[in-house]
């Protein structure tokens, strides 16, 4: 079925997918139409050859290109056909050109510098022999073979106990390639449809879920309280009570500590972040800061064996307890059981507050409300601990 209308950009956006494909022809440019299927909508152009055969060319998806762009391309093709020559086609970009564009984009957006450097390093190291290739010359078979090769762990020369490679490295490298290849037209992307090693795209931390009840937290708290390393114990307790990402928490500097907060100059989001400290958190931070100062360390969680000077591996895999990101999930889960507004809970864990309303919120101006909310969340999380350990000082 074909509808014949004078297309506008608004009408193109309003086209609804159907199980049975249909087309909508444009009255402005002869032969131009939009083909809509259950999966996508694409601009196409029908032309007639000298032997009266009809050729249909795909110009691109409506989600990627405007109606005016499609009309300009269609007019150029029709004009070239009238002159009996093919229209000039721009050569597909090389992988290096796409990588440079992607790095420039990330730098212009001021995205995380470490991630940007990591992308550049992985592509140059593991796909360096592809950088001079046109994106159309990189085939799905090549991608599968390279992923398979990178998935094999290999010893590092001169470092007997170190290896490189593995499924995580392979997935990260090919995911970076997919993102970069998206800078080309989608049908030139050799990573489209690639199946990664991970069974799900849902973020998981070693399969660990959240603790969902105060009783589970009380049992967890009892195990952590008996850890032989007080620095690691306080680190885990503060992760639970703050909902912080472990990467940011382990690199906390003493100079960032305030009266009842910790100021982080840059988080994963790229923003500054002030973490409110409830009374229990303040006690833990005070005890740990005193220990760090006694050791002469600038870090809140010092580790003398680490080259960085602070905790680098915050997990202790010998302990059968929730650690790492599972504690952030626990914080968010139990905080959701309170009557604290969602936007406040999002601000406490450095999540982007949803909607236009979020762009007007000022975390510093709202600090008293955020601190009060932190106190309430601490009481909720530790409600089971207070019953199991009555001698513990309660959150005020």
Image: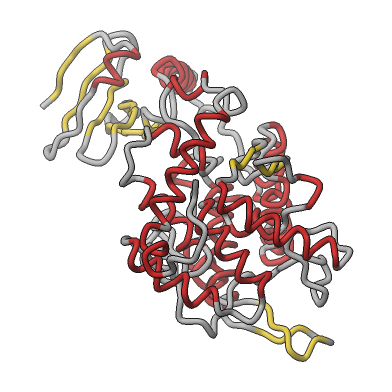
Quarter where residue 5 is shown: top left
- The coloring applied to the image is secondary structure
Left or right of residue 125: residue 48: left
The N terminus, quarter of image? top left
- What residue is at 68 percent from the left and 78 percent from the top? 164
Q: Name, please, the residue furthest toward the front.
A: 391
Q: Name, please, the residue furthest toward the right.
A: 296
Q: Nearer the viewer, residue 285 or 134?
A: 285
Asked whether the viewer can see residue 81, the reply is: no
Residue 36: x and y, percent?
23, 32
Q: Is residue 219 above or below residue 246?
A: below
Left or right of residue 62: residue 115: right
Residue 214: x and y, percent?
34, 61
Total labels drawn: 0
- What residue is at 43 percent from the left and 66 percent from the top? 390
Residue 309: x and y, percent?
82, 66
Q: Is residue 394 above or below residue 98?
A: below
Left or right of residue 118: residue 201: left
Q: Nearer the viewer, residue 47 or 44?
A: 44
Quarter where residue 198 is shown: bottom left
- What residue is at 40 percent from the left and 73 percent from the top? 219
Q: Nearer the viewer, residue 110 or 25?
A: 110
Residue 122: x and y, percent?
68, 61
Left or right of residue 333: residue 114: right
- What residue is at 21 percent from the left and 21 percent from the top? 24
Q: Nearer the viewer, residue 267 or 90?
A: 267
């Amino acid at each position: 079925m074909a509808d014949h209308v004078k297309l506008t950009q608004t009408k193109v956006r309003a086209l609804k997918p159907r199980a049975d494909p249909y087309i909508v022809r444009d009255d402005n440019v002869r032969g131009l139409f939009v083909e809509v299927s259950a999966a996508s909508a694409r601009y196409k152009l029908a032309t007639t050859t000298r032997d009266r055969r009809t050729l249909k060319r795909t110009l691109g998806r409506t989600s990627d290109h405007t109606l005016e762009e499609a009309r300009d391309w269609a007019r150029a093709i029709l004009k070239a056909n009238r002159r009996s020559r093919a229209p000039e086609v721009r050569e597909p970009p090389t992988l290096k050109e796409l990588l440079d564009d992607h790095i420039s984009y990330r730098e212009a957006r001021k995205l995380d510098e470490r991630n940007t450097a990591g992308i550049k390093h992985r592509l140059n190291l593991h796909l360096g022999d592809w950088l001079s290739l046109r994106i159309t010359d990189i085939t799905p078979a090549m991608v599968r073979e390279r992923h398979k090769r990178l998935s094999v762990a290999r010893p590092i020369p001169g470092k007997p106990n170190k290896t490189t490679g593995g499924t995580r490295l392979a997935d990260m490298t090919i995911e970076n390639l997919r993102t970069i290849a998206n800078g080309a037209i989608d049908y030139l992307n050799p990573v489209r449809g690639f199946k990664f090693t991970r069974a799900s795209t849902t973020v998981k931390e070693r399969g660990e879920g959240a603790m969902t009840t105060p009783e589970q937290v009380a049992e967890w708290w009892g195990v952590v309280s008996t850890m032989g390393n007080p620095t690691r114990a306080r680190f885990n307790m503060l992760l639970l009570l703050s909902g912080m990402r472990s990467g940011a928490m382990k690199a906390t500097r003493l100079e960032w500590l305030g009266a009842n907060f910790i100021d982080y100059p840059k988080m994963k989001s790229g923003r500054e972040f002030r973490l409110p400290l409830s009374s229990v958190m303040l006690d833990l931070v005070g005890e740990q800061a005193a220990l760090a100062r006694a050791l002469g360390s600038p870090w809140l969680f010092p580790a003398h064996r680490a080259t960085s000077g602070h905790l680098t591996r915050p997990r202790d895999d010998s302990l059968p307890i929730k650690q790492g990101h599972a504690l952030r999930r626990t914080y968010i889960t139990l905080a959701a059981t309170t009557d604290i507004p969602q936007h406040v809970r999002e601000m406490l864990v450095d999540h982007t507050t949803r909607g236009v309303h979020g762009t007007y919120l000022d975390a510093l101006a709202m600090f008293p409300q955020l601190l009060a909310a932190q106190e309430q969340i601490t009481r909720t999380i530790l409600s089971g601990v207070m019953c199991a350990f009555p001698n513990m000082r309660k959150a005020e």
